[in-house]
Amino acid sequence: MSSYCLVSTLFTPRVRVLRKGRQYVFGRDQACEFVLPSETVSRRHAEIAWGDKTGFLIRDLGSKNGTRVNDQRVDWRPLKDGDRIWIGPFSVLYREYGGNLDDILKESETGDAEKTVAIPKTGFLKGMGTGFAGKFAGTELIEICQLVAINEKDGVLTIHGPTALAGRIAFVRGGIVDADCGEVRGADAALKLLLTPSGTFDFSTTRPDVPKPQPLPTQHILMEAARLRDESAQALPPTPPSPGADGTAATQGDDWGDEWEVVPPDQTPPTPRGPGGGRRK
């Protein structure tokens, strides 16, 4: 038995099961299965549907800014395991799983495999009103930028590398308007910061002090950062699991359920417990 799903921090829980015979539309319209409230997303932007000969495929619905799979713009395309779908600055991962997803879905609060509604703008992460902080060791920074974009937030993301301050990324209405990383500024600095391998971050919802802010190409920056991270991960040899307390190999978390935990900025960030740099809730 095979199962098909989408994985993203834009969903709660992170896994959304895809059912044969159903269509899943992405767009700004509240009637869409996946609501992405951003001006860069069309009202009915793209859809995923099952084809008897192709399996699940994605089709652009004549959107203004296009739909991309991995780094290619597509009109339609059959999906394969591991494809990353980009709609505006938001991305979801398509996965095929050789088994039943029920056990995975039990980890969610609702366990509702049929629910396919993205996080609404009014239901953003707890603590977003005053800011949040945490540790990262993977793609968390890209995911944070996506969540800031979907909620059209103002703020400053400060990133600390393993040994020193790496830099800052400034947002106005969810879009990147400035970034600094040492002597590098602008889009190049934002990309460099998003590729920081590990460290800590804090996000303040204070409007950034940027005179006459001009939007940077947020979608391109996030896509390029994700592409470079994927290439880097594929080039690295697999890391063997560390021994558990009983001497056997410890089982690490996977990308179905690990999440970073949000804490107020004045508290100590949580200790990472998994390859995603977050702590399982």
Image (cartoon, grey):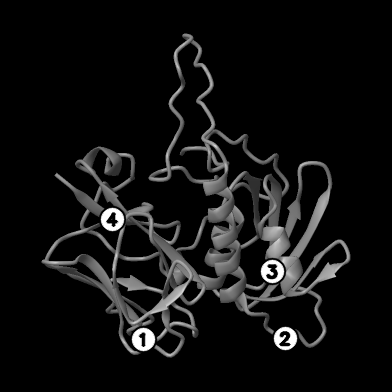
Residue 280 screen position, x and y as percent: 47, 38
- Residue on which the image places disc 2: 214
Image-quadrant location for residue 78? bottom left
* Earlier residue among tags 2 and 3: 3
Q: Amino acid at mark 3?
A: Gly
**Label 1 crowding class (10 Å Cα cut-off): few <14, some 14-19, many 20+?**
many
Judge left or right: residue 180 versus residue 120.
Answer: right
Residue 123 in the figure: left or right of residue 214:
left
What residue is rendered at 28% in x and 76% in y?
47
Q: Is residue 260 above or below residue 71?
A: above
Q: CA distance from mark 4 to mark 2?
A: 37 Å
Which element is circle 3 on?
strand
Q: Nearer the viewer, mark 2 or mark 3?
A: 2
Read off the residue under disc 4: 5
Q: Position of residue 26 (x, y in %)?
A: 33, 75
Instruction: Determine which residue is flagged by label 1.
Output: 43
**Cα distance between the residues tagged 4 and 1:** 23 Å
Q: Is residue 167 visible?
A: yes
Badge number at residue 155: 3
Numbered disc in front, either 3 or 1: 1
Residues at marks 1 and 2, CA–CA distance in whole angstroms: 25 Å
Residue lying at 64% horizontally and 46% vertically, measured from the top left: 134
> Which of the two marks, 4 or 3, is nearer to us in this view?
4
